Structure formats: C-alpha cells, structure tokens
Image: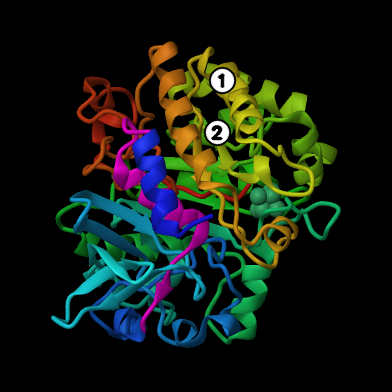
Amino acid sequence: MGSRTALVEDLMKRFPHVPREAVFKEDLLRGGVAFDPSALSDNEGGEVKPKSYFIFSFDHGTLPELGEAALRRPPEEIILTGGPYDLRRTVVSVRVNPASPYRVAAGPDGLLGLYLDGKRISDVGVPPMPEYYRHKLSNGKSVMEVAPTIQWGYLIYLTVFRVCQYFGAKEECQYCDINHNWRQHKAAGRPYTGVKDVEEVLEALEIIDRYDTAKVSTAYTLTGGAITKTVAGRDEADFYGHYAKAIEERFPGRWIGKVVAQALPRDDVQRFKDYGVQIYHPNYEVWDRRLFELYCPGKERYVGRDEWHKRILDSAEIFGARNVIPNFVAGVEMAEPFGFTTVDEAIASTTEGLRFFMSQGITPRFTTWCPEPTTPLGKANPQGAPLEYHIRLLEAYRATMDEFGLSSPPGYGPPGPGNAVFSVSSFMDSLPADEPSAAKGTAEGTAQGATEDEPSAV
Ligand code: SF4
C-alpha cells in the first residue's frame, strides 16, 4: 500500500460520483486527525468552541494518550474548504488520533490548514465559541456540559444518562465506549454528570434560547445508555420521555425533538409521541444476524434482533415512516475477527438491511465507526474499516434511496456537498442538494441543516 494520499486519490478516481469532500470526511472520521498545539482550543475560556465529549469519546486514544489535546481540547468540529482539491464547505466531527497522517496546524501565514502526508490539502475553519457557552447555570455547571451543541450549532445533544445499563463484556455493544468515556472523564476530574436533572436541562436550554438569536439550534436529541431496569424510578420510555415532555411544555415547538432509545414496545413508543417527540431513532447497529448477536449481546439477550426489527416497523405506524430513523454503525461489518473479510460481502449485507427498511419507507442513517481503543472491536481493529467500504456505502445508500423513491431524512439539515452539517458521517454530504422534499414533512419544515448527528447511544 502506498501513501494515504495515493489511497484517497485512487478512490476519488474510481468513484467519481461520490463527492471528493465525502472521501476526505470518511477518512477523517474512520481514522482520526492529529492536532498541532497551534490548532487546539483554550477550552471554555477561549474563542473556539471546544470538543464537548457529548456521548462517546470518539477519539483514537484515551485522554492520557492525547498529550496536549487532553489539556487544551480540540475544537468540536472543523470545516474544510478550498485547497488543491477545491473542497466545498465540509463539516467534520473531530476524532483525535495523534498517529494520523492527517494533521491540523497553523501554516506560516498563521492560518489553519489540514495536512495529509505533510502536504496542505485544505483550509480549516473552527467553530467560534457560541455566546450561550459563556453563561453558567445557577448551580455553576456549564452549558457545554449539560446541553452541548454539535453540527455547527444545529443540534443540541442531550445525553441525559451518560452510562449504559448494558454493562461488561457480556452486555455492552462491542464498539461502544459510553461507560469507559464516563470513567475517563471522572478520572481526569472533568465535570461529567451521570444523570442530568430535568430542571438543569431546562435552564441550559433557556440560556441557549436566549442567546441563540439567529436560531441556529434547530433540533435536540435526548439520548443516553439503555435502561433495562429503571433510573430514578423510571423505565426507559418514562425516563427519556419525561425530558421531552418538560421541554415541549416549556418551549413548545422551539426545536425538533428527537429521541434515541431502544426499540421499545408500541405503548412506550406512543408515549414518546404523546410527549411531543417528532423523530424516533431505534438504532439497529448492524444488519447481519450473526454480527448483531456477537456485537450487541445485551440487545440480543433483552430484546432479540427479530423483535428489534419488528418494533422498528411498528413504530412507523405511530411516528410515520419518515420520522423513524434507525442508525447503524458503518464499518463494524468489517471488524476482525468476526466481520466480513471482503468489501463486497459487507456492502451486500448492509444493502440488504437498507432495502428491508427503505422498502417500508423507513430511512436509516449511519455513523462512521470510530474504533475507540477501549472497546473490544476498536482494540482489535485500530485502523477501522477500509476506506473503500465507506465510499461504496455512500454509493449503495444513495442508490437504495433512489430505488425506493426516498429523499434525505428529516431533522438533519440541508443535504448536498457544501451544504450538509451532519458531522459524524458524510451521508448528507453525498445526497443531492436542494431536494424539494427536504423542506417538507412534520419535522422537516423547521429543519435547517443535522444529527447526532448523531452518533447515538442506545
Ligand atoms: S451502543 Fe447503546 S446499548 Fe450499546 S452499550 Fe452503547 S449505550 Fe449501551
């Protein structure tokens, strides 16, 4: 294998209809990026919006391994533009990897650039510190800790339960570091609230609402770990739902409400809907049966793959198919030792899953797998999945959408290269721009431009 530059350019040549922005974005998301000290933030006291660690670590090293980036956080996201590939504006979530061939650094002119194999390939923009991050809650907590925003300010990410009740090797999803991330922030002495109080969430939202006068924040996502028993006396639907209820009562219709939760029975899903949630993300994680059983042992044991899929279809009767958007973790299909060994097989399997849901009008979306080193799959596959898999997935995703006459899902902001703000995969960057339907529908009417982004836990 030649240089990373050669790999990227070869794929651009072989897949000319996939935007070149998406090729770089996928490569940065799967393999991470190094930060020169000149490109780090000054945390919450500076002018650049720092990485909030909003749910998982999304880094390729533990905090102690990140060097200065552990003390001065990197920016939450970067924007790529220009350079020799003439990139259109591309928002990329930051995943730190000190060993990456990609590096963000200030050039001799003082301007930030992205370097690959030592060569400058684009200009880099960083998010300015939003005014609402400069104000604290009455209990002294920061807005960044309680209600961080991602996707260039589009999405308020409310991880209200920062651990998962699937615990240990026999239950945790094999690519998920939610529990480790909680432990490492606690060990580093960083503020990291395990269960967020509903009143503090409302107070943080009030601050955002007051200072976000341009109304860039468009959606919120309620999420966290799976609840197999109860948290604060509430089951999963009641726990996540009661935040939605309180938010919708206090700020009716201000944001598009989304919930990432397990695939729950119909009555529970109905409760979300009744509380004012508009979009439901019952994530199916990986399509292949054997891999689901191996990678998601907790979900398999408590619910089971077939029942999980059935509940996704059932929830479409409550939310409408367009507003049920299950996530999968793109790339784990190819993780050793159990994954597919060829890109062909992996794409065929993933496409089977896309066809299963899209034929029912349900549009899944995906997060590009970040092989975090404290997870079993990340440990065994520090390089993640082949870049070719990610590029061909973009192609397969778009083709399957076309086959079933679907357009970009609601609540993700504008589609198209140069427009997308969804930062944790480039599926929105790879869809056609200006689809008329992207401005229609329940949640879409107010959508501007992303999710969780969403990564999404449960
Ligand atoms: S992906 Fe979700 S359900 Fe699986 S371990 Fe992580 S938080 Fe729990």
Label 2 residue SS: loop
Whole-percent x, y for residue 333 in the image: 66, 40
Residue 419 to residue 35: above or below: above
Amino acid type, label 2: Pro
Please give the range of residues in magenta: 15-36
Left or right relative to 279: residue 232: right
Q: Nearer the viewer, residue 441 or 107?
A: 107
Q: Is mark 2 within 8 Å of ligand 1?
A: no
List the residue tagged with mark 1: 357
Whole-percent x, y for residue 379 in the image: 71, 63
Whole-percent x, y for residue 336 in the image: 74, 49
Left or right relative to 427: residue 332: right
Amino acid type, label 1: Phe
Q: Are marks 2 and 1 in contact (CB under 8 Å)?
A: yes
Is 84 a magenta residue?
no
Label 1 residue SS: helix
Q: Which mark is residue 326?
A: 2
